[in-house]
Amino acid sequence: MKKRICPALAACLILLLFAMKLPALPHDEDEGPSPVLRINEKGEVKIDSDMLFGERILKKGTYLVEHRAEDKLHVFAFTRIERPPKGAPAVLPEKIEVTSTVIPTERIRSSAVHTEHDHDKNIYRVTKIEIAGENLEHIL
């Protein structure tokens, strides 16, 4: 006599295995800006909501990210890119600079700005910047 598996039990096992491979659905608290913002090849990053950079607030918009190293000091500057309407006078953009601490790491493949939600101030904060081709993480 052959042993047979109950069709309902087999279906439950298949559904259980399938459900284990499904990604977790996002929770409401996960909504908001992405924790990693890509810096494009022009050195620009788009910020979708106000964000802390050091102790200054970067307003929503597109910024040019500049990096310079002076001896062991690594400085980042975010300059807002404003394109005035045609015929309007150009406005000098404000540059916000912050010094970073560097930590050796593997070679970075793509430039990015990492953020974290600051629950005390209810705003995202820039915590780390990576520059493609470098082997350093810049911690803010």
Image (spheres, rainbow, N blue to C red):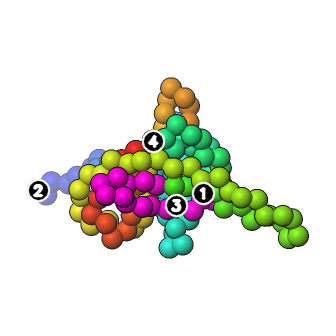
In front here: 75 or 3? 75
Residue designated by label 4: 116
Residue designated by label 1: 79
Residue found farthest to the top: 120
What is the CA distance from the residue labelled 3 to the residue labelled 1? Answer: 7 Å
Q: Residue at x 64, y 57 (%)?
A: 80
What is the CA distance from the residue labelled 2 to the residue labelled 3? Answer: 74 Å
What is the CA distance from the residue labelled 4 to the residue labelled 2? Answer: 62 Å
- Secondary structure mostly seen in magenta is strand
Question: Which callout, 2 or 3, points at the residue further toward the start of the chain?
Answer: 2
Indicate the amino acid at tag 2.
Met
Q: Contact, CB < 8 Å: mark 3 with mark 1?
A: no
Q: Nearer the viewer, mark 3 or mark 4?
A: 3
The quadrant the C terminus occupies is top left
Give the number of the disc on residue 65. 3
Question: Which callout, 4 or 2, points at the residue further toward the start of the chain?
Answer: 2
SS at circle 4:
strand
Residue designated by label 2: 1
